[in-house]
Structures are given as structure tokens and as C-alpha cells.
Image (cartoon, helix red, strand yellow):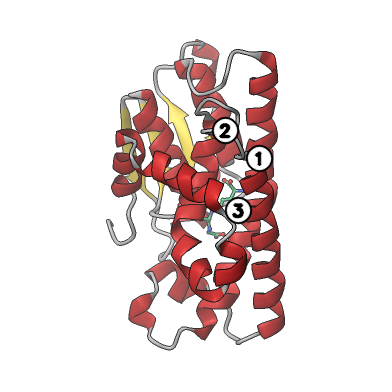
């Protein structure tokens, strides 16, 4: 059984999708970000960095893993791929490609979109249009420079991914942890970016088709739904 310590956010949904797609036996344990429970002494034993998600495997294949928490979504996806023997391609070139793009998401796409949301949400006057976590953590100031910086970088990253998806159904040809890492972030901001940058976004046809393929997957749908905003 996998215990997933989490809240309802994009990073967390990478893992709920993976767990669903693997057919894993898992339990969701809420860590309330609105109450700062991610900084509690209890949670810091799971992730000393004080951020969700984190997981514990209560029936690991290797018993030495019994009390070893797994944190950082990239590490968690790799752990689960090995644990359930799925979504990490066997062919060496595809495997390396999946890992390349997993790191690309964790170090580039995720932080860029996180920063974009932090600054762009400051422009939203009606708080009911934002989720509770963004209301709590968004920039207190309206800063056009920061919004431009992170939206331009996001568009550049979309374009890089769009090129990778040319002639491929999934990032590493076959579906993998690289797709599960990128999907929740892109899905959440996609319609907003189409509104704010219609010209560059009209060229992202490969991502559009990939999103449709991802949306159609049962595990993806259920994984997203399990940690939809406002669930807890
Ligand atoms: N690099 C980390 C990022 C995790 C992260 O940023 N988690 C956010 C929610 S999506 C969080 O816990 N924020 C609360 C905080 O920073 O105190 C990962 O991939 O796991």
C-alpha cells in the first residue's frame, strides 16, 4: 500500500495520475497547505523540504524501503515506475528520453508555470475565481515584468515540447512518467494561455493532440479528479 501525503495541487496530481495508471493500492492522506501542515514536525520527517507531495510504501518490494519516505515528484515517479514496473520504457533510448523530459518538467516547466501563476493571479480581482491556495500564496503586488518574464519562458517551453511531440504520440514515443509529470501543469494553464497569447498558442498543435490523448485516459481522468481543487 502506498500512502500519499498530499494536497490538491498540480504537483500532487502527477502522482495521483501515476498511481491510478499503475493500478496501485493507495491511500490519500491530506496535508493541509492552507494550515501550513507541510511545515509541521511530523510532515518534515517525510520531506525535510516541507513541500507536498511525499509518499511512504508500507509494503515495498525491498523491505529496506519500509521506513524510507519518497519526496520530490520526479523521484516519486521514478520510484513508482520501478516499483510497479511500468511507464519507464524498457528500450534504452526511450528510457533516457523519458528521464530527460522528467527532469525538464521538474526543473523548468513546473517552476516556470508555478511562478507565472504566482504573479498572474495577483491581477485577478475576484478571489472566487482562484483556488484557496493561490489566494493564500499569490504575489501581493501586480508586477507586469514578472508576468511577462514567466509567460514568455512558459511559451518557449511549450514550443520546445511541441517540437518534441512532432511525429510522436507521447514524449518518449510510448506513454511514460514524462507525460504524467507534464500533463497536470499544462492542462491547468492551457486555456488561460490561449486567451493571453493566441498567436503563439495557435502553433502548438502537437501539444493540443497530446492533451486530447491524455484527457481520454481513464487513469488520468480519475487521478486528476481525486485531487481536484476544493476536494478537501
Ligand atoms: N519540486 C517539488 C515541488 C513541490 C511543491 O512545490 N509543492 C507545493 C505544492 S504544489 C507546496 O508544497 N507548497 C507549499 C510550500 O511551499 O510551503 C516537487 O516536485 O515535489
Check whether the beta carbons of the residues at disc 1 and disc 2 lie within 8 A of each other. yes
- Above or below, 142 against 175 in this view is below
Which residue was labeled with disc 2? Answer: 168
Pick whichever, 71 or 39, lies toward us.
Answer: 71
> What number is the disc on residue 107?
none
Whether residue 120 is situated above or below residue 44 in the rendered picture = below
Callouts 3 and 1 close, C-beta under 8 Å: no
Report how far apart the C-alphas of labels 1 and 2 lie in the structure. 8 Å
Name the residue at 45% across, 59% down: 188
Q: Position of residue 58 (x, y in %)?
A: 40, 22
Q: Nearer the viewer, mark 2 or mark 3?
A: 2
- The kind of secondary structure element at disc 3 is helix
Within 8 Å of ligand 1, the CB of disc 3? yes
Residue highlighted by disc 3: 110
Q: Which residue is mark 1?
A: 164
Element on which disc 2 rests = loop
Amino acid at each position: 500500500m502506498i500512502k500519499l501525503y498530499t494536497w490538491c495541487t498540480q504537483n500532487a496530481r502527477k502522482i495521483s495520475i501515476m498511481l491510478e495508471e499503475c493500478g496501485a493500492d493507495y491511500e490519500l492522506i491530506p496535508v493541509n497547505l492552507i494550515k501550513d501542515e507541510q511545515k509541521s514536525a511530523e510532515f518534515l520527517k517525510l520531506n525535510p523540504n516541507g513541500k507536498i507531495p511525499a509518499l511512504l510504501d508500507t509494503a515495498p518490494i525491498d523491505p529496506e524501503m519500509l521506513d524510507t519516505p519518497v519526496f520530490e515528484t520526479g523521484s516519486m515517479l521514478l520510484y513508482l515506475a520501478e516499483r510497479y514496473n511500468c511507464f519507464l520504457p524498457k528500450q534504452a533510448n526511450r528510457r533516457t528520453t523519458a528521464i530527460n523530459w522528467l527532469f525538464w518538467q521538474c526543473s523548468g516547466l513546473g517552476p516556470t508555470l508555478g511562478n507565472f501563476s504566482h504573479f498572474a493571479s495577483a491581477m485577478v480581482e475576484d478571489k472566487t475565481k482562484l483556488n484557496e491556495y493561490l489566494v493564500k500564496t499569490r504575489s501581493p503586488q501586480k508586477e507586469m515584468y514578472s508576468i511577462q518574464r514567466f509567460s514568455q519562458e512558459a511559451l518557449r517551453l511549450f514550443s520546445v515540447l511541441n517540437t518534441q511531440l512532432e511525429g510522436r504520440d507521447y514524449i518518449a514515443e510510448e506513454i511514460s512518467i514524462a507525460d504524467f509529470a507534464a500533463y497536470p501543469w499544462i492542462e491547468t494553464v492551457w486555456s488561460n494561455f490561449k486567451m493571453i497569447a493566441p498567436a503563439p498558442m495557435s502553433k502548438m498543435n502537437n501539444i493540443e493532440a497530446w492533451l486530447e490523448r491524455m484527457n481520454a485516459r481513464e487513469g488520468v481522468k480519475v487521478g486528476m479528479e481525486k485531487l481536484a481543487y476544493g476536494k478537501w
